[in-house]
């Protein structure tokens, strides 16, 4: 089972497509920089994608939508 729930994250972000882009971008940042928003022992996930999802669910990643 995925933690946190995709439905919960979609409610926070607004769309599944935006969620996928934000999670992928944040996971890549975690891999490249090794910078975490929480202490490493506070994460339930081991992989960067799961950790990015946890950060989004806790409100640590802010999404700025651009206007066209």
Image: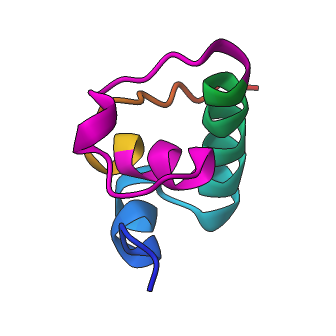
Q: Is residue 46 magenta?
A: yes
**Front position in the image: 65 or 44:** 44
**Front position in the image: 26 or 19:** 26
Q: Is residue 5 above or below residue 46?
A: below
Where does residue 28 sit, x and y in percent of width and height? 73, 32
Q: What span is colored magenta in the figure?
A: 32-54
Q: Is residue 1 above or below residue 12?
A: below
Q: Is residue 67 visible?
A: no
Q: Quadrant of the N terminus?
A: bottom left
10 horizontally vs 39: left or right: right
41 horizontally vs 20: left or right: left
**Front position in the image: 37 or 10:** 37
Residue at 37%, 50% (x, y): give it: 54
Q: Is residue 60 magenta?
A: no
41 horizontally vs 53: left or right: left
Residue at 26%, 39% (x, y): give it: 41
Where does residue 6 sit, x and y in percent of width and height? 46, 73
Residue furthest out toward the bottom? 1
**Front position in the image: 15 or 51:** 51
Q: Quadrant of the C terminus?
A: top right
Q: Is residue 60 above or below residue 7?
A: above
Q: In which quarter of the view is residue 24 placed?
A: top right
| Chosen colour scheme | rainbow
Residue at 50%, 16% (x, y): give it: 35
Where does residue 56 sit, x and y in percent of width and height? 39, 44
Where does residue 43 sit, x and y in percent of width and height? 32, 47
């Amino acid at each position: 089972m995925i933690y946190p729930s995709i439905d919960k994250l979609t409610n926070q972000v607004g769309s599944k497509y935006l969620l996928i882009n934000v999670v992928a971008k944040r996971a890549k940042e975690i891999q490249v920089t090794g910078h975490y928003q929480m202490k490493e022992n506070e994460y339930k996930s081991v992989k960067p994608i799961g950790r990015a999802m946890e950060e989004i669910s806790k409100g640590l990643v802010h999404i700025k939508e651009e206007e066209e």
